[in-house]
Image (tube, helix red, strand yellow):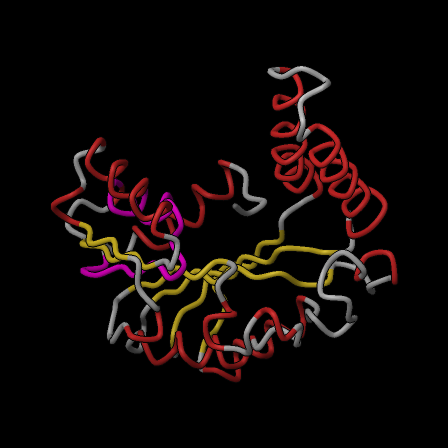
Amino acid sequence: MTPLSEARADRLVAFLAEAEPATVLDIGCGWAELLLRVLEASPSSRGRGADLDREAIEHARSEAQRRGLASRVELSAADARELAGPRDAVVCIGSSQVWGPPVEAAQPLDYAAALAALRALVPQGGRVVYGEGIWSRPPTPAAIAPLGGRDDEFVTLPALLELAAAAGFLPVQVHEANLDEWDEFESGFAARYAWWFADRSPEHPDADEVRARAARQRAAYFDGYRGVLGMAYLCLVAV
């Protein structure tokens, strides 16, 4: 659930796995795909993944079992704030809200709180892959309307790097999702609606609602935040 190509994912996994970390934590892991790939690339590592979505955790567990990794990973539907450190490596992508105000409050994303919490989880030399939304270009009214409705919801990439440094990290690699990655990501939403209609009668009782949802998603992206909302992936080392 993030605009991330296979090539870029490989680089993030390699950054974590090359250190052969004894312990790897994935916060807001979802299906735990990156965590499982790190464990595959580093056979001596053990992992822990946490996410509040129980269905996602069940899927992650089935994937771990299928790939022969179940004995080296613990996956739980848990609040990441309750997880204690230290860990040699941490993945946190799109989960900064864990340490900030509730999403429903529509407040700016608290990157500083998230980065401080991540720094507390790793020792000096520990590695963190931190991914979060940023503004790639100055936000426009059309871009912010379908998001949080405010132009200070996200920061720019340079500002994010300064926040990471203030929290006790230095970047080893700095990535930003490109437009192809975003288009592929958003196409997943479009495909879901398209296949729904392909498999059902146009007279289906939910057809009007689904058609409206599809139209809102297209407008939000193509007429709104495409090229404005970005996604940064930072490979950080604790100093």
Q: Residue at x 30, y 51 (%)?
A: 17
Would you place residue 63 above or below residue 21 in this image? Answer: above
Would you place residue 83 above or below residue 89 in this image? Answer: below
Q: Is residue 75 magenta?
A: no
Q: Residue at x 35, y 63 (%)?
A: 90
Q: Indicate the quadrant where residue 51 lies.
A: bottom left
Would you place residue 214 above or below residue 198 in this image? Answer: below
In the image, is 204 to the left or to the right of 112? Answer: right
Asked whether 144 or 128 is in front, the reply is 144
Asked whether 199 or 94 is in front, the reply is 199
Please provide percent x and percent y for residue 226.
Answer: 77, 47
Q: Indicate the quadrant where residue 67 lies.
A: top left
Q: Is residue 27 magenta?
A: yes
Quadrant the C terminus occupies: bottom left
Would you place residue 119 above or below residue 53 in this image? Answer: below
Please provide percent x and percent y for residue 47.
Answer: 23, 55
Q: Which residues are magenta?
A: 21-40
